[in-house]
Image (tube, rainbow, N blue to C red):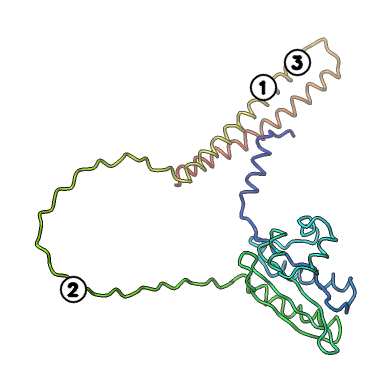
Amino acid sequence: MRLSPLFVLLFFALAAYGQQQERVAIINTVDDRDSIGFSDLTFLTNKLRETAVNILPKSRYGVMTTESIVAFLGSHEALVRECKASSCLAELGRKVSADYVAQAHIGRFGNQLSINFDLYKVASGNLINSFAGYSKDIFGLLAIIEEKAPVLFKQMLDEPKPIPKLVVEKPELVKLEPEPMKPVPEKPKVEEPNVEKPFKTSFWIALSLDIVGAAIIFAGYSEDRKMMEARNKYDMRGQSSSYYIDAWEDAKSSSSSRNTLYTIGGIFLASGIGVHIWF
């Protein structure tokens, strides 16, 4: 089935117009003391990302993969270098265009393994929350993540917003002597400029739907003309059988495209009319 380029562009435009997700970047786990292997670090990072995906609603949050983070930094080597050298995790989050950024660090506490996980709001650079723990082996660290990571990510859903305090200074009372009353001059009449009220947003949405629907229907009309031309070729006599077959296939294809475009265009027109009536 052949679709109009206008319809394809409209589809991607509507998809991009949808609700934008907030990006959550969980940077690769770093081992400060080289206590565990690379594969164990990768497993812990994947476990943190899996927990974030399961807790955070997908309609609002999108958890970035390692590949998407590497795409912003240029290479996997740059990611490893940034993970170890970055002194500010929020700054690293800005480099990968994230709204939230988090990272776990593995170290030593006495003769045991330790883990420390921090979650930052990139725009403000503020620490939302963190958790820490220690264990004698990697399985204990995994248990700490399974226990504390869900609680931490849930706090992103109801992150408290500071309420600005309104401070009103009490004015000093000044005693004024009454002045003699003066005649009040008449105010000159000023003609108010005739300013047209701007159209509502709903009007432009409805108008856009009408225009798109009309364009799609016009594309369907073009397909209908193509179908009629192909049918005329098919009805001609004195031609080869292959010529008939090609003409018949073109007619069928144009008919299918015409019906599809008429249906989609009608939906857009009806939607535009509905917005006009409703708002």
Q: Nearer the viewer, residue 84 or 24?
A: 84
Marked residue nearer the N-terminal end (2 or 1):
2
- In the rendering, which numbered label is found on residue 225? 1
Q: The N terminus is located in which quarter?
A: top right
Q: Residue at point 14% right, 50% down?
A: 185
- In the rendering, which numbered label is found on residue 175? 2
| Marks 1 and 3 in Cβ contact (< 8 Å) | no
- In the rendering, which numbered label is found on residue 153? none
Q: Residue at point 60% right, 32% down?
A: 215
How much space separates mark 2 and mark 3, taking CA atoms? 103 Å
Between marks 1 and 3 in the image, the one whose residue lies nearer the viewer? 1
Instruction: Classify residue 131 as left or right of residue 187.
Output: right
Between marks 2 and 3 in the image, the one whose residue lies nearer the viewer? 2
Q: Which residue is mark 3?
A: 235
Percent from the top left, x then y, of residue 201?
A: 48, 46
Q: Amino acid at mark 1?
A: Arg
